[in-house]
Amino acid sequence: MNKRLIFILVTMFLNFLGFSIVIPILPFLVQHYAPDQNTIALHVGLLISVYALCQFIAAPGLGALSDLYGRRPILLISLFGSVIGYVLLGVGGSLWILFLGRIIDGLTGGNTSTVYAYMADITKPKERGKYYGMLGAAGGFGFMFGPAIGGFTAHIFLTLPLFLAAGVTLVNMVWGYFVLPESLPKEHKSIKLDFNHLNPFQQFSHIFEIIALKRLFSMAFLFFLAFNAMYGNASVYLKDVFSWSAAQIGILLFVVGLMDIFSQGYLLRKLLSKFGEMNVIIIGTILSFIGLFIAASTSFFVSTYLIYLGVIILIIGYGLFEPSTSGMISNAVGPKMQGRVQGANQGMQSIARVFGPLLSAFAYQYWRGLPYSLEALLVVGSFIVFTSSLALIKSHKIQS
């Protein structure tokens, strides 16, 4: 395995490690600063959403900048932004400092679009689904260890996990500075960049001129809206309904990471070679619906076994859906548009991360099982959009 691939996989691992290390401790962190303890769920949702909103604003522009200047400098700058964000969260002191940390990390640390564009640069189109699965598996490892580290080191002191995340991200940035070569050949770089390339809404306007991409993005948005609504509320739900500690939440999320590795690192390759990307997406949506339905039932039947079963099925479904969808989106365009299309893709997911947690926080105040029920319905919508668009997607010709 070459050094470029190793660095990209490690970076993806650290992205998810840093994201997930916060999840089990966030309700307890907010608890120290929230003026009203009844607003903890709302503030947790807002912290997750504001980070995603900043990613949405920045991701398309970062993707376009990487098309112009190359992937390497954008990756390194993004990693540095994440370091600052983690430190501010760790320092804390008030709610506004927590929000400032999330804003800085979101604006400068949204490097996932560049990671995917870098992977597209160094792989063949037919192999991208497989390599995106490897990225997903690396993220799964991060998600497996992040919550466990966050939950257990929080017993030493609550913000220790955040300083650990800042330290390993800084080491990764320095390592990348010395070992990471540029992946985008000079002949494939954009020749100009104007304001429209930095405007996230303009990016969508350009991408959505390709009808097949418009359908794929619409289908993916509904799915990711459901998935991020679940994550935005999961720790609060487990704290309130199951009376779990940060460590217990971390153990469940450790299992989530383990299932993500199994799904994206092993099962995906088996199913892709046998059924192809389109059928794997359908399987992923069906499994995700079943998982969310089971999770919703735990608001009536508070059972550790049921919540584990529902979450495991959901994560296996997600692990099949996400890389297959990313592969189809990437293969719909040529090399000169990879940065823009991946920036738009991550921007779309950022919108889902903005509104998903807010949706679950709003629904949670009416009934604790309502967020999961709404999320299951969104997955059904994603399934309908995709299956009704299959003929159009199959007839699409690659855009350069």
Image (cartoon, rainbow, N blue to C red):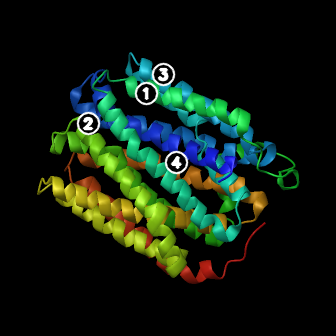
- Of the pair 144 and 338, the residue shown nearer to us: 144
Taking the spot 39% from the left edge, 35% from the top edge, the residue there is 22
Can you give x and y, in whole percent of width and height, for residue 304 in the image?
16, 52
The CA span between labels 2 and 3 is: 23 Å
Please name whichever residue, 19 or 349, is drawn nearer the observer in this view of the structure: 19
For marks 2 and 4, give the CA distance: 28 Å
- Reading the image, the residue beneath label 4 is 350
> Which one is in front in this view, the residue at disc 1 or the one at disc 4?
1
Between disc 1 and disc 4, whose residue precedes? 1
Vertical arrangement, residue 195 with respect to residue 323, above or below? above
- Residue at label 2? 247
The residues bearing labels 1 and 4 have C-alpha atoms spaced at a distance of: 22 Å
Residue 126, image quadrant: bottom right
Residue type, numbered disc 2: Ala
* Numbered label tally: 4
Q: Of the residues under marks 2 and 4, which one precedes in the sequence? A: 2
Binning the other alpha carbons within 10 Å of mark 1 as few (below 14), some (14 to 19) or many (20 upward) gives many
Q: Position of residue 387 (x, y in %)?
A: 48, 79
What residue is at 76 percent from the left and 43 percent from the top?
A: 181
The residue that disc 3 covers is 88
Sequence-wise, the earlier of marks 2 and 3 is: 3
Question: Label 3 to label 4, Cα distance in Å?
Answer: 21 Å
Q: Amino acid at mark 1?
A: Leu
Determine the secondary structure under disc 4: helix
Q: Which residue is mark 1?
A: 162
Disc 2 secondary structure class: helix
**SS for callout 1:** helix
- Horizontal side of 285 relative to 189 (left or right) equals left
Mark 4 Cα within 10 Å, few/some/many (few <14, many 20+)? many
Q: Amino acid at mark 3?
A: Leu
